[in-house]
Amino acid sequence: MMRSWLNIGWCLSLILLTACVEEYELPVTAKGEGLLVVDGSLYVEAGTAEVKLTRSQRLESKGAAKGEVGATVWIEHGTNNKISLVERAPGLYKAAGLNVVYGTEYRLRIKTKAGLEYMSTQMAATPTPPIDAITWGVEGDLVNIRVSTHDPTSKTRYYRWEFEETFAYAAPYVTANILGADGKMRLRTPDDSVYQLCYRYNPSSAILVGASSKLAEDVVNNFRLTSINGNSEKLALRYSMLVRQYAISQAEFDFWQILRKNTEEVGSLFDSQPSQVRGNITNRNAPADPVLGFFSVKSMVTKRFFLDKTQLQPYAFKFTPDCFFQEIPLIDGALDQNFINDFIALRYVQVDRRDPIDNLPSEGIAWMVRYGCVDCRDAGGTGKKPSFW
C-alpha cells in the first residue's frame, strides 16, 4: 500500500513554529493523485473573486496540472446571498464588480462536473495596515530587499506578501547589418524592428509569510522578500518591485507555513506535493478525504520600490553579458553553407564594428553575435516603457 504524509491539526504553539506530523495512508485507489487542489481568493478593494481548481499529481509527474473544468463555483454570504463565478479558462473561475465588505463572512462552494461537493469554512477580511518601508542592503554579493510594517491596533499579527519585479536591461551591441531570410547580409533599415532597451516583468514565486504573534507590539521589521546577486542583469540599469501586503488569519498563516516547507522541496501549490496539506476546504461527500488549498478573503495594500544602478556603484557590481563574436565565412554575400545549421537556426546577426560602415563584402569574414545581444526582446522582455517608470 502506498504511503504519503499528511500534516494534520495546526500545532497550538506558533512560538516553536513546528508542525505536528502523523502518518496518513492513502487508499490504494487514490494512488497519491487526483485530489482536488483549490486556490481561491476574494479581493476586498478590487471587488473580484478568482478560484483556480486543479488535481494533484504523482511526484514523478512532469508539467503543469490540468484545470478542473466544468465545475459550478460560487461564494455565499449572509442569508441566501450568492456570487456565481464563471469559468474563464480551463479550471480558472472568476467574478468581478463585487461589493466585498470588511467583517462579512464568506464561504466558497464548489460542485464538480462529477457531482462532488466541496465547501470552505467561513472567512472574513480585516483592513491591512500600510507598508512602512521597503529597504535594501548588501551582504557579500547579495542585495537583500526587505519590508517593514506595523499595526498600531494590534489586530493583524499575521501577514503575507507577494511581489512583482520589473527591471530595465539592454542589448549590449547595435547591429549595422542584419541576416536576411535568404542567408545574405544587408544593411539594417529603420523598418527593421530591433530594440536595444527593454523591460522585463517577473512575478514572485516564493511563499512569504510573517508574524508578530510572539511580540508585545504588532510590528514586523526588515522581513526579507528576496535576495539578488549584485552582478545580476536585474540590477545592471534600474530595478523596481511592486509589493502586495495582506493581513491574514492564523489558520491561513499556518497553511502557508506548511506549504512553504513542501514547496521548497518540490515546486508550487500546483505541482506534485511530497505531503498533503489540509487547508480550510472539505469534501462534503467524504469529509475525511484531504483537499489541498485554501480560500481567503483578502485585504491588500501596495507599495512600489526602485533601485537605480547609481545607488550600487560603491559596491563595484558588474553585469557581464553572455555575448561573444564569431567569425563566419561569407561567400558571394551569403553565409558559408557549412555554417547554415549552426548559425542561421540560432538567429545570429552580423554586428559591423567598422566606422564608418562600408559596403558589405561579397566574400571574406562576417562578425556574428547572438541575436539577443543586439535585440533585447529575444530575452523575453518588451520594448515598451512601463507607465510607472
Image (cartoon, grey):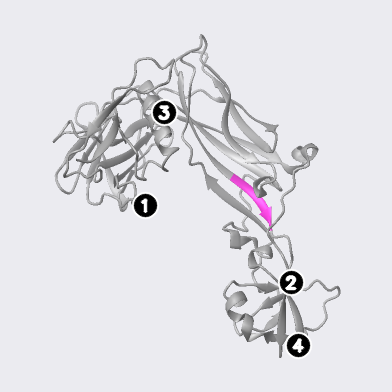
Q: Position of residue 338 (x, y in %)?
A: 62, 83
Q: Are marks 3 and 1 in contact (CB under 8 Å)?
A: no
Along the viewing direction, whichever of 125 and 248 lies nearer the viewer = 248
Identity, as a three-letter code, of the amino acid under mark 2: Val
Residue with the mark numbered 2:
351
Q: Are marks 3 and 2 in contact (CB under 8 Å)?
A: no
Query: For the N terminus, which image quadrant?
Result: top left
Residue with the mark numbered 3:
257
What whole-number distance in Å separates the C-alpha atoms at marks 3 and 1?
Answer: 23 Å
Q: Is residue 233 left or right of residue 264?
A: right
Residue at image coords 28%, 31%: 6
Q: Earlier in the sequence, mark 3 or mark 2?
A: 3
Identity, as a three-letter code, of the amino acid under mark 1: Ala
- Kindly state the secondary structure of the residue where label 4 is placed: strand
What whole-number distance in Å separates the C-alpha atoms at marks 3 and 2?
Answer: 51 Å
Q: Are marks 4 and 1 in contact (CB under 8 Å)?
A: no
Residue 167 in the magenta stretch? The answer is yes
Q: Are marks 2 and 4 in contact (CB under 8 Å)?
A: no
- Kindly state the secondary structure of the residue where label 1 is placed: loop
> Is residue 153 placed above or below 315 in the rendered structure?
above
Q: Position of residue 183 (x, y in %)?
A: 63, 83
Residue with the mark numbered 1:
64
Along the viewing direction, whichever of 221 and 228 lies nearer the viewer = 228
Residue with the mark numbered 4:
363
Identity, as a three-letter code, of the amino acid under mark 4: Glu
What whole-number distance in Å separates the C-alpha atoms at marks 2 and 4?
Answer: 16 Å
Mark 1, residues whose alpha carbon is within 10 Å: few (<14), some, or many (≥20)?
Answer: few
Residue at image coords 23%, 41%: 2
Q: Earlier in the sequence, mark 1 or mark 2?
A: 1
Bounds of the magenta segment: 166-170
